Image (spheres, grey):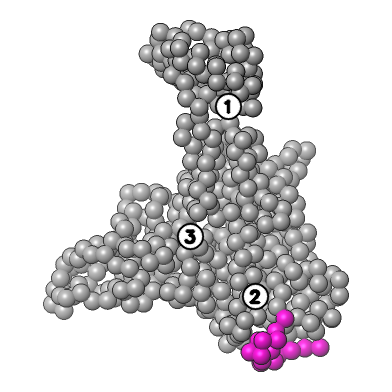
Amino acid sequence: MSKTYEQINERIRSGKAVVYTAEEVIDLVREKGADKAAEEVDVVTTGTFGAMCSSGAFVNFGHASPAIRMTDIRLNDVQVDGGLAAVDTYIGATATVPGQKAGYGGAHVIEDLIAHKKIHLHASGPGTDCYVRKEIDTWITIDDINDAYLYNPRNCYQNYGVATNTSDRTIYTYMGKLMPRMKNASYSSAGQLSPLLNDPHLETIGMGTKIFLGGGEGYVTWPGTQYKTNVEEVNGVPVGGSRTLALIGDMRQMDAKFIRGLDITGYGVSMAVGVGIPIPVLNKDIIQRCAISDEEIFSDMVDYSQPVDRPAMARYSYAQLRTGKVEYNGKTIRTSSLSSYSGARKVASILKDWIEHKEFTLNQPVMTFPKDVKLNKLQERGC
Amino acid sequence: MDKKFKIEFDEANVQDSVSYILVTEFDLKPNVLKAEISGDGSGVMILALEGEEAKLEAAEKRLKEAGFNVSITKRIERDEDLCWDCGACVSICPVFCFSHDKDTMKVMLDNSKCIACSSCVNACSVHALSLHL
């Protein structure tokens, strides 16, 4: 049996849609089989809430009188992009206060904007015949500027490696604090709840897919940067970083609980982003893939103390990783998640709630994403 | 019960054996968590002490009378509004203060085990953890 987007949306609009989260659907498919489950369920909701460095926000401040073409722009001292039109900027999540490696950064500015906090704006520009002003110092909030929307070039990584440290010193990485001699290991995927592990070949997710982004409605706009497909698969899903998504969403709809500035010791600033993607159950194959569980999703552990070439040391399932410890050559390594599983679950359940209450319908993608992509390495050459 | 004492000393009492007093006079079981002596003879020691409550109180009084500056040290504290339940701290703590609740998957903190090593503090990306020794 199969369903169309229109049939599913009709059921949503009439309040009859049956919605399961990607966690709940596992037991349902195990008990009833994919055929029965596909008849019963209309939508499966997924969720993830983790650090996604390639995130940021476009903002338009509005013109002051006299007007200024801003080229050096600081928000709460954080230096943001001055390479757009006069009063536009892009606040990169990892932007910092000049001279500082970490602390308060772009992601914190974005979180504070969403929380309706006052932000100190200081900007200067060259002064031109059309923009005579050279400097401005003022305070803004999201309520008195013009546009404010997230545009995240790379979110929702489809799986990601496990990090450990074989060296004799503690190292501080974007994969967290890694203690010497493999005392611990960290991982970041939401596993069985993660959007792209539930629709691994992006049959239903593409440009125009409507999603939960940071507590509001957003959209998938493009394949994310570093999107690649040539990754080994086990049980139909990649065992390492593979596909990614570029996302967009109106910051005024968002909730600062789902967009958090992170200060990662030794690495810098990043942003935790809550993303949920609904998967329409168009047929039994789709719900079968949504039923994947942490026991069936694997990731390779690599040594982050190696500056280049990190070969896979061992392969673990997310079920093993979530027990808090894994074995490696007779040694016990303690494990930490770097993304919030309880947050991912909350995202998936809020999205489920929206759909059940007729507040959210599904969009059919207007463009699907590439099936065969490899990544290039950066070449170093003279000219 | 157990308490953690932060004991500050100076050149006048740096030679005294605090642990000996606590064991012989008060039947307490000390565990040295941290001890530092500076070049001027001053220093600080953090002791985890196990024993009867009345004896712990009497021991604190006795050390103060002997000229030591004694305070009860704090354990790791978490700002619940800031914590986002990621779990970065879980594998860092040497005495397993942090764990995921099996049902809610939230990160639970049992600070009764805390040995005040502060290793988790800089593992937290939202500065939710603090330790005031």
Check contact, mark 1 vs mark 2: CB within 8 A: no
Chain ID of residue with mark 3? A
Give above or below for A17 relative to A50.
below
Q: Position of residue B131 (x, y in %)?
A: 49, 37
Classify residue A51 as left or right of residue A344: left
**Residue type, numbered disc 2:** Lys
Identify the residue at image location x=41%, y=50%: A102
Which residue occupies the foreground of this view, A45 or A222? Answer: A45
Task: State the residue lying farthest toward the front.
Answer: B54
Q: Which residue is mark 3?
A: A260
Q: Which residue is mark 1?
A: B3
Chain ID of residue with mark 1? B
Can residue A91 be seen here? The reply is no
Q: Which residue is mark 2?
A: A352
- In the picture, residue A34 is in which quadrant? bottom right
Q: Which residues are magenta?
A: A1-18
